[in-house]
Image: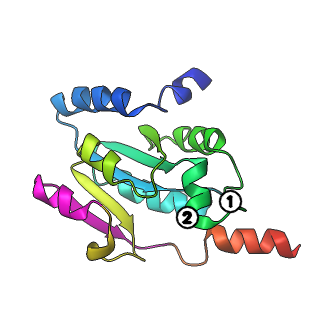
Amino acid sequence: MLDIIQAKIQTVDQAKATLAAKRISGAKVVFTNGCFDLLHTGHLHYLAEARALGQCLVIGLNSDESVASLKGAHRPIKNEQSRALLLASLLFVDLVVVFSEDTPLQLITQLKPDVLVKGGDYTEETVVGAKEVRAWGGDVQLLSFLPGYSTSKLEAKIKAS
């Protein structure tokens, strides 16, 4: 079973080939990205809702270096291999691709998703890749968050205890 989960963690080139095959069968590809440092219920709701927008959910996962650059030297809490494995173990996640840049723009332009998804704390103008996805006929969706859940709140609670 672990090998099935690990097979969902792919390089960009592997993911491009996987997505080409899925598209031949008519699958709509949904893409989202993030650090997913401490996976919580809010993430699960968000990812399940994202997957419902198509037949293949791809997660662009920030590498350890990318997370540290965005969140500070104290992050990530879990390394990228652990974060990727946890995400790939979710039933509704089809692929996980780790990227090292601060933004997923390069990954988005290489994978060309049909739907780009981000959380409700973004606007379409602030979603990296929105302009590019719209240019090739794709859609951009902003999903609401489940109130009360965030990695930052979990981190603060752990530090306080």
Residue under the point 60% across and 38% down: 85
In depth, the one of 80 and 21 nearer the eye is 80
Amino acid type for the residue under numbered disc 1: Arg
Q: Position of residue 48 (x, y in %)?
A: 44, 54
Q: Position of residue 141 (x, y in %)?
A: 28, 65
> In which quadrant of the rendered image does the C terminus lie?
bottom right
Residue under the point 71% across and 69% down: 154
Picture disc at residue 3: none
Magenta segment: 129-145
In depth, the one of 104 and 27 nearer the eye is 104
Question: Is there CB contact under 8 Å for labels 1 and 2?
Answer: yes
Q: Secondary structure at mark 2?
A: helix
Question: Could you tell whether 102 is left or right of 115 in the image?
Answer: right
How many residues crowd mark 2 within 10 Å: few (<14), some (14–19), many (20+)?
A: some
Does any portion of residue 1 appear in the rendered image? no
Quarter assignment of residue 15: top left
Q: CA distance from mark 1 to mark 2?
A: 9 Å
How many circles with numbers are drawn on the protein? 2
Does any portion of residue 27 appear in the rendered image? yes
Q: Which residue is mark 2?
A: 70
Q: Which residue is mark 1?
A: 75
Q: Please determine whether, in this image, residue 54 is positioned above or below residue 40.
A: above
Amino acid type for the residue under numbered disc 2: Leu
> In which quadrant of the rendered image does the N terminus lie?
top right
Along the polypeptide, which appears first: circle 1 or circle 2? 2
Residue 3 magenta-highlighted: no
Q: Please determine whether, in this image, residue 47 is positioned above or below residue 12.
A: below
In depth, the one of 156 and 93 nearer the eye is 156
Residue under the point 46% across and 57% down: 102
How many residues crowd mark 1 within 10 Å: few (<14), some (14–19), many (20+)?
A: some
Residue under the point 40% across and 75% down: 120
